[in-house]
Amino acid sequence: MFLHQNALDLLHAHMQNQNLRRHCYSVGKVLAAFYDYYKTSGAPAGFDGMGALSRENWEIVGILHDADWELTANDEANHTLMLLGWVKELDLPEEMLNVFRSHNNRTTHLREPQTLLEWTLECLDELTGFIVAVALMMPTRKLAEVTVESIIKKFTKKDFAKAVNREQITQCEQKLAISVEEFVRIALKAMQDNHELLGL
């Protein structure tokens, strides 16, 4: 069975940049938090439940989703394709492989996001980086100072974190039936709960 530690070992073997690693950690922790959220509130309308993957699987998806980014940042056409090559022999569930196929779909065109996990990753990927950017603007540069309100306020300032695709995040309302405020709240809490791992 492919476990959390196996995912970290694979990530660390291919990614040396600490900030990039922390991005992957944060996406993993936030996906795990959304797994808990959906378990409690139920899957949004339009989805056939949460699928067969476990909470640990959801976190592993987050850990690995950008594992090849250090090597493909200047070769985006191969982003996720390289990762899929690495995990080919690991006997991962097809549902997990499909998440990787849907990631970077605008470039690879392998698979449009379809499942609850795929759409959750699609919407939160950019958000985690945005939350880090907000934290770094705080006097202590810590997540503890960040609030949902401070994130939403910065969200409307187009000159802040210009590289972040706001529309990718706000899809959460249409695709997941979760308000932007609630989506931010869940992600922020997960990151705050793991602030030591994230160095913030």
Image (spheres, helix red, strand yellow):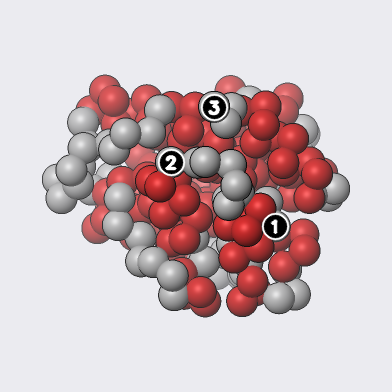
**Which of the two residues, 183 or 69, is positioned nearer the viewer here?**
69
- Give residue 93's mark: 2
Say whether disc 2 or disc 1 marks the residue closer to the N-terminus.
1
Q: Secondary structure at mark 3?
A: loop
Q: Nearer the viewer, mark 1 or mark 3?
A: 3
Q: Secondary structure at mark 1?
A: loop
CA distance for labels 2 and 1: 19 Å
- Give residue 139's mark: none
Disc 3: which residue: 1
- Give residue 68's mark: 1
Q: Label 3 crowding class (10 Å Cα cut-off): few <14, some 14-19, many 20+? A: few
Q: Residue 90 in the image: x percent, y percent? A: 58, 42
Q: Nearer the viewer, mark 2 or mark 1?
A: 2
Say whether disc 3 or disc 2 marks the residue closer to the N-terminus.
3
The structure residue drawn at horizontal position 79% and vertical position 49%, both measured from the top left corner, is: 15
Picture quadrant of residue 5? top right
CA distance for labels 3 and 2: 10 Å
Quick check: 24 above or below 114? Answer: above
**Which of the two residues, 118 or 1, is positioned nearer the viewer here?**
1
CA distance for labels 1 and 3: 22 Å
Kindly identify the amino acid type of the residue bearing the numbered disc 2: Pro
